[in-house]
Amino acid sequence: MRVAGLFSTKIAYKEITVVSTGPSTGIREGMGLRVLPGGGTGYLVGGPTVRIQGAGTWLLVSCADPEAAVVRIRAHLSG
């Protein structure tokens, strides 16, 4: 994941436990790398998101087409 060309991270498919569409974000959540309520990390630019959960952590990532992203990520998950 990358936001604003400044902040990025990688998560291995084997670390993902759940992936789903997330809420739309906006001014309240801000733009860039964000620490979110509930302990998650956001890579946000506003608009629709994908929520990616791993062991003990979760990410909220802005994405133009979250439904398609969820399908692509799930195709790589084992089990």
Image (cartoon, rainbow, N blue to C red):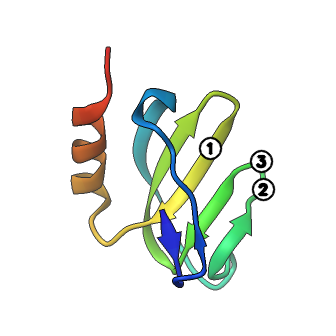
The three-letter amino acid code for the residue at tag 2 is Pro
Q: Residue at x 32, y 14 (%)?
A: 79
Q: Is residue 62 above or below residue 68?
A: below
Any mark on residue 37, and which? 2
Task: Please identify, in this view, whether the residue under mark 2 or under mark 1 is nearer the observer.
Answer: 1
Q: Residue at x 51, y 52 (%)?
A: 10
Q: Nearer the viewer, residue 12 or 32?
A: 12
Q: Residues within 10 Å of mark 2 (few under 14, many from 20)?
A: few
Q: Helix, strand, or loop for circle 3? A: loop
Circle 3 residue: 38
Residue 35 placement, left or right of 64: right
Residue 74 placement, left or right of 21: left
The three-letter amino acid code for the residue at tag 1 is Trp
Q: Residue at x 28, y 54 (%)?
A: 69
Residue 15 placement, left or right of 33: left
Q: Tag 3 or tag 1, which sits nearer the N-term?
A: 3
Q: Tag 1 or tag 2, which sits nearer the N-term?
A: 2
The reply to whether discs 2 and 3 touch (Cβ–Cβ < 8 Å) is yes
The reply to whether discs 1 and 3 touch (Cβ–Cβ < 8 Å) is yes
